């Protein structure tokens, strides 16, 4: 379980195929800030751009760890198949502050940035989300974008997608990878955990 509050910026520095065929996944080596892995143990969960992964090797002194990503996970996420910057979040502990919202680390769909421009001191980010996720997206509701807990300001349904608008403050741009987004960028989306269960319960009725 996570909160959507990014605790560090990492970088995928090496991608290694786990087999010769398309059905095989990838082993990622991630470089972290100094000291980031001091309290991380083998097998711990760390979210990469919002996707929960298991640390399979850890070299705290070098500030690097590895994760194995299945072909299925690669197919259902964005930004985990090549070198580049990633948002990192360690798993939530029972005594931690819940600064964002409850995030499971399970990507529900991949959206595409449709607009990203400054508005005053902040930036407006609009994302075209898969239409199937539209029912879970609400004004003033929560959504995780590349693992970052954000508040939805506007929702607009279209035939093939649902567009959400989000306001990003300078702090968020400076301390996450969201500041590097551009129109056309693909992003991992996780809907609100509570909304998922509410929909399931009402559907059973």
Image (cartoon, rainbow, N blue to C red):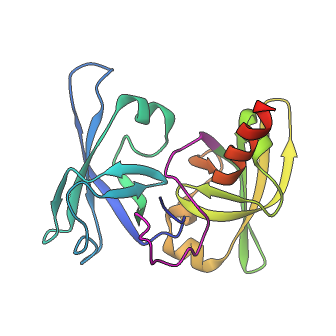
Residue 52 horizontal/vertical position (percent): 42, 50
Q: Residue at x 51, y 45 (%)?
A: 106
Residue 104 versus residue 190: which sits nearer the camera?
Answer: 104
Q: Residue at x 34, y 56 (%)?
A: 45
Q: Say which quarter of the image contains residue 88.
A: bottom left
Q: In the rendered image of this protein, does residue 12 appear above or below residue 80? A: below
Is residue 129 toward the left or the right of residue 145 in the image? right
Q: Residue at x 78, y 57 (%)?
A: 165
Q: Residue 104 lies in magenta, yes or no?
A: yes
Residue 181 versus residue 73: which sits nearer the camera?
Answer: 73
Specify whether residue 192 is in view: no
Is residue 193 toward the left or the right of residue 65 in the image? right
Give the quadrant of the C terminus. top right
Magenta stretch mostly in which secondary structure?
Answer: loop
Q: In the rendered image of this protein, does residue 11 appear above or below residue 170? A: above
Q: In the rendered image of this protein, does residue 18 appear above or below residue 39? A: above
Q: Say which quarter of the image contains residue 84.
A: bottom left
Residue 176 horizontal/vertical position (percent): 50, 68
Q: Say which quarter of the image contains residue 148.
A: bottom right
Which residue reaches farthest front?
205
Q: Residue 167 lies in magenta, yes or no?
A: no
Q: Which residues are magenta?
A: 91-111
Q: Residue at x 60, y 39 (%)?
A: 109
Specify whether residue 201 is in view: yes
Residue 55 horizontal/vertical position (percent): 26, 54
């Amino acid at each position: 379980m996570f909160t959507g509050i990014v605790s560090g910026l990492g970088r995928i520095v090496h991608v290694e195929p786990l087999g010769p065929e398309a059905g095989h996944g990838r082993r990622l080596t991630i470089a972290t800030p100094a000291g980031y892995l001091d309290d991380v143990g083998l097998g711990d969960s760390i979210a990469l751009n919002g996707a929960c992964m298991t640390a399979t090797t850890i070299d705290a002194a070098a500030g690097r760890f590895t994760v194995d990503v299945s072909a299925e996970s690669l197919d259902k996420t964005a930004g985990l198949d090549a070198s580049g910057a990633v948002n990192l979040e360690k798993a939530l502990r029972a005594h931690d502050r819940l600064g964002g919202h409850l995030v499971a680390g399970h990507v529900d769909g991949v959206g595409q940035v449709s607009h990203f421009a400054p508005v005053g001191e902040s930036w407006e980010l609009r994302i075209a989300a898969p239409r199937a996720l539209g029912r879970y997206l609400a004004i003033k509701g929560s959504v995780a974008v590349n693992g970052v807990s954000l508040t939805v300001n506007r929702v607009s349904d279209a035939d093939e997608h649902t567009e959400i608008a989000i306001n990003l403050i300078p702090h968020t741009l400076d301390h996450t990878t969201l500041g590097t987004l551009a129109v056309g960028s693909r992003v991992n989306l996780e809907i609100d955990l509570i909304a998922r269960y509410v929909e399931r319960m009402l559907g059973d009725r």
